[in-house]
């Protein structure tokens, strides 16, 4: 069930982390197509960033103007520097974001390289990306909204899967808990669903049970032909 609320009354991304951008002098790393292909297929953050830049319509006049953010996580297998090296294989522009303690927590990325775009398209067509990329970043766009709005989703109490299994899914682990959420509004694109179909959004009841409050956020955007349309995002606090 959806309950319309005033967007001005709810500050969704409640974070106390202070962040700063630092410019790196790193140059793009020349690597094989095979290596770029492996990085894309094995990095959820890179997949999401490329999807936000390449798959989601927006009002930018040039692809160079479209930015995304990738979380840098403490990983036993990959150091922060190794994660940064992978980003430089995929994007022409990478700005490191640090917290108040100078810890590198994320990067602002833009301008995928031609080889990265080529490998992303190949991986997309081969169905090698996370299955949730195809669920939330592609498909038809429902045209049932004509105003900016915010709705709170009220859970009816039914849960279809074990919550722990959802939390352990790499895609949802990243979307729900990565440090990227300290920088930008957390959310999942759900424009392919009409408001009347909200209960059809995969795992919506489970996500509602994990977060404090779950919302459908509607905002206005433009396509490359300057035609206005409305996007829906599943977001939370």
Image (tube, rainbow, N blue to C red):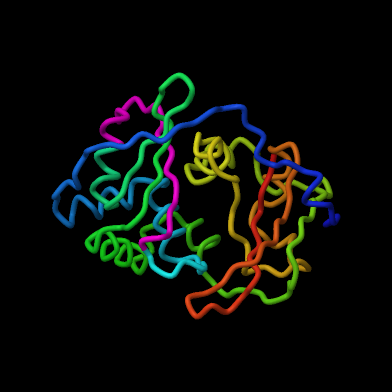
Count of numbered circles in the view:
0
Residue ID at (81%, 48%): 155
Q: Indicate whether residue 79 is drawn in magenta.
A: yes
- Where's the N terminus, which quadrant? bottom right
Residue ID at (51%, 56%): 132
Q: Nearer the viewer, residue 176 or 21?
A: 21
Q: Is residue 133 above or below residue 45?
A: below
33 left or right, relative to 172: left
Q: Nearer the viewer, residue 140 or 108?
A: 108
56 left or right, relative to 114: right
Q: What x and y, as percent, mark residue 93?
A: 30, 49
Q: Is residue 82 above or below residue 196?
A: above
Q: Quadrant of residue 26?
A: top left
Looking at the rendering, the stretch of residues picked out in magenta corresponds to 64-83
Q: Indicate whether residue 76 is drawn in magenta.
A: yes
13 left or right, relative to 170: right
Q: Nearer the viewer, residue 168 or 187?
A: 187
Q: Quadrant of residue 121?
A: bottom left
Q: What x and y, as percent, mark residue 108?
A: 40, 44
Q: What x and y, as percent, mark residue 237?
A: 69, 39
Q: What x and y, as percent, mark residue 57?
A: 51, 69
Residue ID at (48%, 58%): 133
Q: Nearer the viewer, residue 199 or 143?
A: 143
């Amino acid at each position: 069930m959806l309950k319309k609320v005033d967007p001005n009354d709810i500050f969704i991304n409640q974070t106390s982390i202070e962040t700063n951008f630092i410019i790196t002098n790193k140059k793009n790393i020349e690597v094989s197509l095979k290596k770029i292909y492996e990085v894309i297929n094995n990095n959820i953050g890179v997949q999401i960033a490329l999807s936000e830049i390449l798959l989601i319509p927006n009002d930018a006049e040039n692809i160079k103007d479209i930015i995304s953010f990738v979380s840098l996580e403490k990983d036993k297998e990959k150091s922060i520097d190794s994660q940064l090296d992978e980003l430089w294989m995929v994007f022409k522009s990478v700005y490191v974001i640090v917290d108040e303690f100078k810890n590198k927590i994320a990067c602002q990325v833009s301008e995928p390289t031609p080889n990265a775009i080529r490998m992303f398209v190949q991986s997309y067509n081969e169905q090698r990306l996370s299955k949730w990329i195809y669920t939330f970043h592609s498909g038809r766009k429902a045209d049932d909204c004509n105003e900016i709005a915010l709705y709170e989703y009220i859970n009816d109490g039914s849960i279809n899967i074990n919550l722990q299994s959802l939390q352990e899914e790499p895609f949802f682990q990243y979307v729900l808990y990565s440090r990227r959420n300290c920088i930008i509004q957390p959310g999942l694109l759900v424009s392919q669903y009409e408001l009347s179909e909200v209960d059809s959004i995969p795992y919506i009841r489970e996500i509602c049970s994990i977060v404090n409050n779950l919302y459908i956020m509607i905002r206005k955007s433009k396509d490359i032909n300057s035609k206005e349309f409305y996007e829906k995002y599943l977001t939370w606090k």
